[in-house]
Image: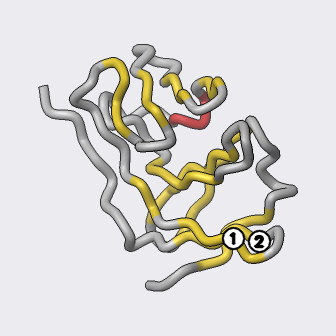
Amino acid sequence: MAFVRVCSLDDVWEGEMESFEVGDKEILVAHLDGGDVVATQAICPHQQVELVDGELDKKTLTCKSHLWTFDLTTCKGINPGHAELARYPVKLDGDDIYIDPDGDTPKVAHS
């Protein structure tokens, strides 16, 4: 699959995030402070909790369940540091957000 239009910037305002079905994947789109748009897996790699129910603070996403935190500029874990989220390629065309759902694979944490 190539880039697919997922939503527009009006659907995910700066400082917010929303979950979308893209192909056979659930993808979280986060519109970070400063205007960057990041697409990542919608499920926490820890215990399969919906990340959209967590908290987005500037560029840090905190899962509501066990407070795992991720830096969405890199999709790497802050706490714990070994955690990682998928990072899907994003392309903006005007106000439209396009994502390549095959550009990465959802990550799972290993104990």
Q: How many marks?
A: 2
Q: Residues within 10 Å of mark 1 (few under 14, many from 20)?
A: some
* 104 relative to 70, above or below: below
Q: Quadrant of residue 92?
A: bottom right
- Farthest residue in the left direction? 111
Q: Amino acid at mark 2?
A: Asp
User: Quadrant of the image for the C terminus?
Assistant: top left
* 71 relative to 36, above or below: above
Q: Label 1, on which residue?
A: 92
Q: Are the residues tagged 2 and 1 within 8 Å (C-beta)?
A: yes
Along the horizontal axis of the image, is 101 left or right of 97? Answer: left
Please report the residue visible at 44 percent of the width from the left and 15 percent of the height from the top.
Answer: 67
- Farthest residue in the front direction? 34
Along the horizontal axis of the image, is 67 left or right of 4? Answer: left
Residue 106 % position (x, y): 33, 53
- Farthest residue in the bottom direction? 2
Q: Quadrant of residue 57?
A: top right
User: Quadrant of the image for the N terminus?
Assistant: bottom left
Q: Label 2, on which residue?
A: 96
Please report the residue visible at 42 percent of the width from the left and 55 percent of the height from the top.
Answer: 87
Q: Quadrant of residue 39?
A: bottom right
